[in-house]
Amino acid sequence: MNEILLTRRESLNAGAAIAGVSLASMLQMQSHAAPSRREKSCIVIYCWGGISHHESWDPKPDAPKEIRGIFNPISTATPGVFVSEHIPLLAQQTEKLAIIRSIHHSDSAHGRGMYWNMTGHMPPANRPGNIAPTRDDWPSLAAMVSEFRAHRSGVPRAVRLPYPMVDNGTLQAGEYGGWLGAQYDPIVMRTPAGKEFGGVSRTLGSEVLNLKTGLDEARLTQRHQLMTTLERRVGQSADFESFDHFRDMASGILLSSGVKTAYDLDREDPKNRERYGDHIGGQSLLLARRLTEVGVPIVQVICSAGDLNGGAGDMWDTHSDNFNRLKDRLLPVYDRGASALLMDLEERGRLDDTLVVFLTDFGRTPRINGGAGRDHYPNAYSVVLAGGGIKGGQVYGSSDSNGAHPQSHACGPEDLHATIFQALGISPRAEIRDMLNRPFPVSDGKVLPLF
């Protein structure tokens, strides 16, 4: 007997013929019967300056006093899991969280630590100290995720709230589009409400979008049409790439209703706004939720309100007076805003479709310094994932009794990135291409077993 081999298409055609319908009609019916699953969005909560793991997610109550500090651990919603006493609201949310206590890398500079966490790759060795952004940099997490999401007019590929990251007068590489190009630079949007605290971060000439312009929409439309009619470009298109991209994005947002409406926090239920807290950290997290609802694929929130500049102000580089700054200012904002975001997403039925990523530069040195503060320490720190299919109520890995080194299941930023891409439905080995069309996998790490 001759063996007959049918391709899938031939089999479908045969089945369709028996049923009396065409293949095209059958495929159309299949598409209506099984709509594609909604793509997941992502909110990154970034603690610029390096949140201390000892005073947040990985307390060490049995360590000597000069290591454990003055905060006490408290129990959480997950039996056997303890966190700092100054994140009590997040302690009630641990059944949503996967706490990773064994992450580490090897660079103790803020910008370089941020680069490692935000790109999943080692910072360039030939550029020591603060790294100003260039088109040779590896793209940020936000830029890479946006590459795999459909781009819609008037909707940014990715957004940063409420400031770019700055250290001692330098914008920092690691949160831009890098070699993907200027069109992948996540735009910076000013959060329209919430009290500033401790000063604000400088923008240093970066392009920042503030939608509270007061411009009449009809007048703005006329201006845009006139500009398009009259404008004549000179020089090469690459010379204008960044300017044109930002201008067109700003015009699209201002002339479309979705993002502009989401930006108007006055439309939010006042009780829900209050739950997030009347400060720029909480209101930025609320805005992030609203922006993902109207189609922004990924929003990065800097959960502090100042640049670093020697470790003073309301950010996480607490070299002096660490404990008072954490308990009085930083941790209450972080705790209230992040816990409100998790509850809000759950109540709206969006937590499974929204991955929340808690990131930072690194942790603190095990031994408290002479100024009752912390120093930079990348050898062990904690990060957290929630939503997006991540199984909550778990701790992955551990640090040793002093919080100095991973004790079990050591992992790095590259593994975290592989896990993030997996959670977002993007293959951890999916390819992105640079401006020379060379292919690179989005991550080099292993997917952590958090699902």
Image (tube, grey):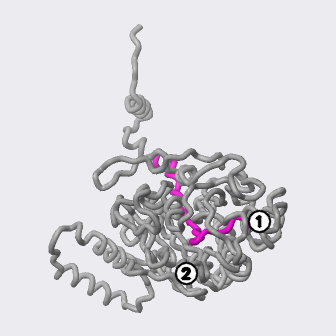
Q: Position of residue 51 (x, y in %)?
A: 64, 69
Specify whether 381 is left or right of 20: right
Tell me which residue sits at (83%, 56%) in the image: 80
Q: Is residue 123 above or below residue 448?
A: below
Q: Which residues are magenta?
A: 31-54
Where is mark 1, residue-wise?
67
**Tag 1: amino acid:** Ile
Where is mark 2, residue-wise?
306
Q: Position of residue 305 (x, y in %)?
A: 57, 81
Callout 2 environment at 10 Å: few (<14), some (14 to 19), or many (20+)?
many
**Tag 2: amino acid:** Gly
**Eye-nearest disc, 1 or 2:** 1
Contact between marks 1 and 2 (CB within 8 A): the answer is no
Near-viewer residue (72 or 301) = 72
Q: Position of residue 362 (x, y in %)?
A: 61, 63
Report which quarter residue 113 is drawn in: bottom right
